[in-house]
Image (cartoon, grey):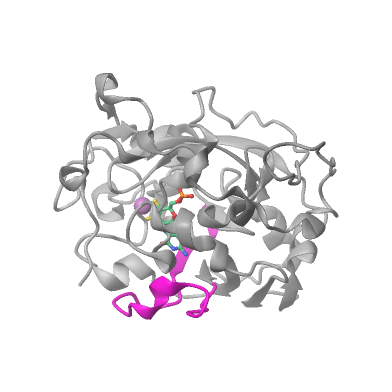
Amino acid sequence: MPRRPGPGTTRAPDPTSDLKWSDVTPERLWLGRRDVMAGAAALLAAPALTRPAFARIEAAPSALSTDEAPNTFEEITNYNNFYEFGWEKTDPARNAHLMTTDPWSITIDGLVERPGVYDLADVMKGQPLEERIYRFRCVEAWSMVIPWIGFQLSGLLERVGVQPGAKYVAFETLHRPNEMPGQYRTAIRWPYREGLRIDEAMNPLTILATGLYGKEMPKQNGAPIRLVVPWKYGFKSIKSIVKIRLVEEQPPTTWQQLQAGEYGFYANVNPEVDHPRWSQATERRIGAGLLAGRQETLMFNGYADHVAGLYDGMDLRALY
Ligand SMILES: Nc1nc2c(c(=O)[nH]1)N[C@H]1C(S)=C(S)[C@@H](COP(=O)(O)O)O[C@H]1N2
Ligand SMILES: [Mo]
């Protein structure tokens, strides 16, 4: 059974610090979805540059953004977890170009008023894009600050109409082994699955992200559309979503299915509840350098003011 590398197995120095833009193939990273973004984004044709031109996305800033310094684009796109493309942090940057993201549609069904297969442009229609600069904390005890572009999941759910009986939202990633070589390893039961309670899904912090750094989403970060839930460990933020289902029962999720003793459904960031194999009290900020040392992990990843009330009366230790 595959196990995640914990902080104890992390190589030092930080492998991302050795990677330069020239180590990746930008043409592959940026062959993309300019056309689909057109409905919601203002496109500027970039003048001749050494890098290929790609769409810039217009998005309003948000009061929900942190003022912490974002990680670099190179860090965010070269140190990834996307097991569909391999288990090493550098595998997604190398392999995600294999994934076709155009055309793209999302099946929205279950307890909704208007179920259907929605084209990506239709999913985004009318949803105001914002830049949300969020802290991002992986369960492996590393973290980044990422300037996402996206819109509130609540906006989409309101548009499709949530029926009263719906208590959870279940998400699924694309399952296409011939484009996702990691899916030939069957230790994980593909497709990757995640879920949220309906009030978590409706929280204003919860977004569907379609870009970062003002550009369309790089494939290794979950193009063309992925979830971002900043107060939970990173594995909840499911990438490359093709299915959203409103359900009555708590849905099965990939990491809980794989190792229930190590990963729960709620997975709220909590420095007081250790992972069975390592402490969650501190984290390593990617790119901070060896001299910076580890920093303290914040309850709910620093978003307690916005979300602690969702868990009133619940045992936070059980919400790991
Ligand atoms: N479909 C899918 N979504 C996924 C993953 C994955 O392997 N497959 N990894 C998760 C984990 S463990 C983390 S930490 C984040 C990483 O997001 P990033 O690479 O954009 O930083 O994506 C999450 N979403
Ligand atoms: Mo993660």
Q: Is residue 267 above or below residue 44?
A: below
Compared across the picture, whether 305 is left or right of 262 comes to: right
The answer to which quarter of the image holds residue 63 is top right
Residue 228, percent from left and from top? 53, 50
Q: Looking at the rendering, in which quadrant would you find the N terminus? A: bottom left
Q: Where residue 129 sits in the image (x, y, percent)?
A: 74, 44
Instruction: Assess whether residue 180 is covered by the magenta stretch.
Output: yes
Which residue is rendered at x = 66% and y = 68% of the image?
Answer: 162
Q: Is residue 191 above or below residue 127?
A: below
Tell me which segment is drawn in magenta.
Answer: 174-200
Count how many numbered circles sit on residues in the image.
Answer: 0
Q: Whole-percent x and y of residue 251?
A: 43, 73
**209 and 112: which one is in front?**
209
- Magenta-span inclusion, residue 251: no
Residue at 49%, 23% (x, y): give it: 68
Q: Quadrant of ligand 1?
A: bottom left
